[in-house]
Image (cartoon, grey):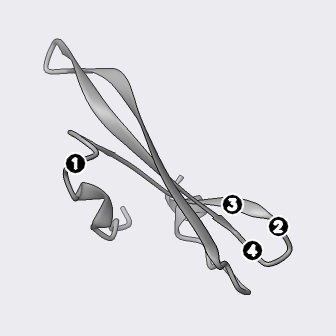
Amino acid sequence: MGEFLNRPLTGDWPYLWLDATYLKVRQGGRIVPVAAIIAVAANTEGRREIIGLGIGPSEAETFWTEVPRGP
């Protein structure tokens, strides 16, 4: 997943969409809701690519602005 999200994008990508959905995950023996933020871009030829994905406590939090670090 890290290799996919850290790949170079070549060319122009003038369109960007951010969307969020909530998932229920198990954390510490409890089921809690988390926000899954997905960034999709479209290039000038109309091709769409997922360019980012983040999981955090809420879409109101700014966790998705942080640059992910590799393993």
Q: Amino acid at mark 4?
A: Asn
Q: Secondary structure at mark 2?
A: loop
Q: Amino acid at mark 1?
A: Ala
Name the mark on residue 46. Answer: 2
Locate the C terminus by quadrant: bottom left
Q: Secondary structure at mark 4?
A: loop
Query: Could you tell which of marks 4 and 3 lies nearer the N-terminus?
Result: 4
- Asked if labels 1 and 3 touch by Cβ distance under 8 angstroms, the answer is no
Residue named by callout 4: 43
Gap in Å between the C-alphas at discs 2 and 4? 5 Å
Name the mark on residue 49. Answer: 3
- Asked if labels 4 and 2 touch by Cβ distance under 8 angstroms, the answer is yes
Residue named by callout 1: 60
- Asked if labels 3 and 4 touch by Cβ distance under 8 angstroms, the answer is yes
Q: Residue at x 81, y 64 (%)?
A: 47
Nearer the camera: disc 4 or disc 3 = 4
